[in-house]
Image (cartoon, helix red, strand yellow):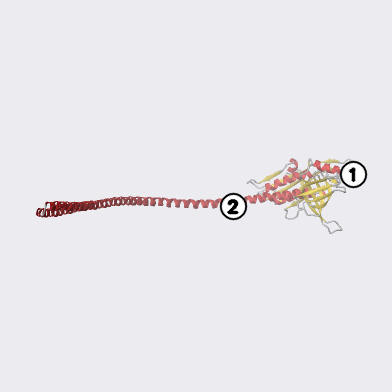
Amino acid sequence: MFDGLVERLVKDLSTAARDETDAAVAAARKEADAAAAAARKEAEAKAATARLDAEKAAESQLASARADGEARLAAAQAMNAGLLESVEAARQEVKAFEARLQQLEEERTQLLQARDEAGTALDAETRRANELAESLEAAVQEANLAKQAASLARVEADARRQDRELALDRIGAALRSIDRATTPSEILEALLEPLAHDFAKAAVFLVGAAGLNGWRAHGLADTSDIAKLVIPRTSDSLPTRAVTTRKRVQVTANGGEPPIGLWGNPVAGAVALPIHAGDSVIAVAYAEDTEETSSQNVGRKIAEMLIKHASLRLTTKGKASPQAITGTRTTGNTAQTGEGNLEPVEYSPARQARRLRMQEGIEVVLDGSASSLVDISSIGAQVLSPLALRPNRVVKMTLRGEESALACRVRVMWARFEQPRGTSAAQYRVGVKFTDLEPKAVDGFMARHGIEATLERTEPAKLKDSA
């Protein structure tokens, strides 16, 4: 419709321009004709030359009119061209508007489609977010449970580690007690203490010819003295079985009827461990518990370990008595005299290396402090120090004589406080063990300084008397 109006307008303008041009031309012609007629009349009247001038004037006016008409035609054509350009521009704008309208319609369709897709995606993401939230909550719960389990595992691990450390501390303390012991009584006491820690009742029996004699016990309600208790060798008991088999003997309930302990009460478990000295069984360690506990196996293993270590320190020595010269004969672990009396065989702690007493002229510095060297062996030494040294520490020690010096590191095996009579100065008697020296180096040092071996002689203690 708009294009029809434009085309009609263009035609009207073109027709008007031609009509105006034709009217102008017609008017000009009329004027020219009139002028020509007048000129002819004037020319006829005046002269032939005037006609020529008139014609020239008419031609001049005609040319002017023609030029004016052509100018008007050019202006009309130019106007027409401008109108055409305006129409074309309008047409282009209409096309651009239609294209933009179509583009907007397509964008609207795309936006609607995108809105629908976004709604669908939003629903899907909402469901996924809900699922993820549920999964996250479940994962958090699992993580919390895992964290709690890890915490419990760490607590259990710490408890086990602490139990192991406590067990190692107890083993170390017992081993040091055994190493420091100078009598069999002290050795047996060092064995009895760990059993009393892990079992409700524990006791040590000394092996005699007729039976097993009670020595000492822990955990009994009345007393720890069981010297009057004697177990005949012919009786069927765990201690006698341990002596006969020379091995560990134990019993447990295992869900059935509880066994009867040595003191006549039902027990959850009991164990008897033989204590060897050389080739002989000289004593039996016995322990029992009324309830099954996890520490029983640990206690039994610790006791076995300590008994093996103690057996290395116990050595059998026959006692020379007047009766031995007149026909004494040895039976089992006792010496039987001609009068029929039984005297117990003596035992003393066995040293791990020969100890040599020191001579003057050997200086010792232990952990930076000047000390006194009591005796020395190829694996350790005994020192009097003004410092309190904790067992199991590793410190520096320097031995210096006239010929040479010896520097090394030693481990403190035991330490004992002493205060000599008549003085207020305190000192510590310390036993140390070389950790980075070969025995040959120590032997060479002693040889260069003329240290002679004088074995320390001590009266062996009796098991019977040491109780």
Residue 117: give x, y in percent of width and height. 38, 50
The residue lying toward the viewer, choosing from 448 and 213, is 448
Residue 110: give x, y in percent of width and height. 35, 50
Mark 2: give few (<14), some (14-19) or many (20+) Cα within 10 Å.
few
Residue 28: give x, y in percent of width and height. 15, 54
* 20 relative position to 381: left or right: left
Q: Give the CA separation, mark 2 to mark 1.
A: 71 Å
* 107 relative position to 198: left or right: left
Determine the residue positioned at 51% across, 51% down. 139
The residue lying toward the viewer, choosing from 237 and 410, is 410
Residue highlighted by disc 2: 151
Q: What residue type is labelled 1?
A: Pro
For numbered disc 1, what is the local secondary structure?
helix
For numbered disc 2, what is the local secondary structure?
helix
Residue highlighted by disc 1: 322
Mark 2 vs mark 1: give the one in front: 2
Q: Which amino acid does label 2 sit on?
A: Ser
Let me know if residue 124 appears in the view: yes
Q: Which of marks 2 and 1 is nearer the N terminus?
A: 2
